[in-house]
Amino acid sequence: MGEIVNLRQARKQKARAAKEKDAEANRIKFGRTKADKDHGQAAKDFAARRLDQSKLTPDE
């Protein structure tokens, strides 16, 4: 004989799993701290300055 399943609980469990999946995606997408963002921007600025300094003829 098959296992008895409470449909209300199964539906709620499925909804919780979907919300957790969305939350994980948002943590990946928006999960950077301000310090991480500042550090990334500083690294980009440093690389851009380094590239400009190594040019043979300056842009005018």
Image (spheres, rainbow, N blue to C red):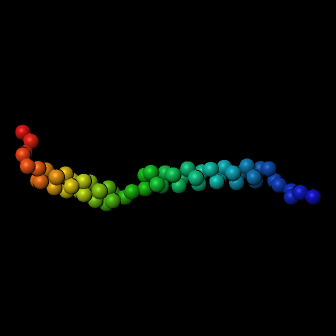
Quadrant of the snapshot with the C terminus: top left
Image position of 60 (left or right of 37): left
Quadrant of the snapshot with the N terminus: bottom right
Residue 19, x across and y down, in percent: 60, 51
Quick one: 7 or 47, which is closer to the camera? 47
Q: Residue at x 76, y 53 (%)?
A: 9
Q: Is there any visible trace of residue 38 in the rendered image? A: no
Image position of 17 (left or right of 8): left
Residue 47, x across and y down, in percent: 21, 55
Residue 23, x across and y down, in percent: 54, 53
Quick one: 2 or 35, which is closer to the camera? 2
Q: Residue at x 31, y 60 (%)?
A: 35
Residue 49, x across and y down, in percent: 15, 53
Q: How many marks on residues?
A: 0
Q: Is there any visible trace of residue 39 in the rendered image? A: yes
Q: Residue at x 9, y 42 (%)?
A: 59
Image position of 24 (left or right of 2): left
Image position of 35 (left or right of 53): right
Q: Residue at x 70, y 54 (%)?
A: 13
Quick one: 3 or 43, which is closer to the camera? 43
Residue furthest to the top? 60
Residue furthest to the right? 1
* Quarter residue 54 falls in: bottom left
